[in-house]
Amino acid sequence: MNEDAAAVSSPGPVWSDPEIPDDERAVLLVRLIEDPTAREDDQDDAASGLEFLSGPFVEAALIRAIRAGDFRSDLAQRCAESLAGIWAREGRVDPDFLPELHSLAQDEVFGILGIRAPHLLPPGAR
């Protein structure tokens, strides 16, 4: 079996490497979603990976990315999915940011909360 040594010794993507502590992983993933030169698929993977982390740093970064994407970019939608996943898992929402949501990001958040934690949806939400 003749495997490429570089591929074998590679630590793997930051979002799945078990050697990286969660706090460090969060910083690396946030840097990636905030890097305007990063590849779109890497940003999407990073945004998706952030769903499995928690804390004010992660949530603030996701909210910044959603706002920066004007609530409708592909990255904003992926960040909205992760934010909704965090909220559903933790059983709470950000009461200051929730009313600000609109467009495709709102659709993503409300859709995920509607399935995973409908009790967290604001009154009158779908």
Image (tube, helix red, strand yellow):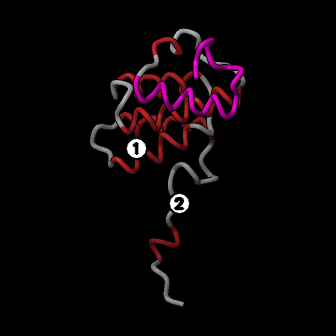
* Quadrant in which residue 103 is drawn: top left
Query: What secondary structure is marked by label 2?
Result: loop
Depth check, front residue: 21 or 41: 41
Q: Reading the chain from its start, which is encountered first: label 2 or label 1?
A: 2
Q: Main secondary structure of the magenta part?
A: helix
Determine the secondary structure under disc 1. Answer: helix
For marks 2 and 1, give the CA distance.
18 Å
Which of the 4 image quarters holds residue 21?
top right
Q: Residue furthest bottom?
A: 1
Residue position marked by numbered label 2 in the rendering: 11
Q: Position of residue 5 (x, y in %)?
A: 47, 77
Q: Position of residue 120 (x, y in %)?
A: 67, 20
Measured as percent of width and height from the top left, residue 121 is found at 63, 19
What residue sits 58% from the left and 23% below the top?
A: 126
> Does residue 108 show up magenta in the picture?
yes
Q: Quadrant of the N terminus?
A: bottom right
Question: What residue type is disc 2 on?
Answer: Pro
Q: Nearer the viewer, residue 45 or 28?
A: 45
Lateral position of residue 84 relative to residue 38, left or right: right
Q: Residues within 10 Å of mark 2 (few under 14, many from 20)?
A: few
Vertically, is 105 above or below 10? above
x, y (%) of residue 75? 39, 37
Report if residue 78 lies within the magenta region.
no
Extent of the magenta region: 103-126
Tell me the kind of residue under disc 1.
Answer: Gln
Query: Which residue is drawn at the image coordinates 62% and 34% (left, top)?
Result: 85
Q: Is residue 101 left or right of residue 52?
A: left
**Residue found at x 50% / y 11%:** 99
Whether residue 18 is situated above or below residue 82 in the rendered picture? below
**Residue denoted by label 1:** 43
- Tag in front: 2 or 1: 1
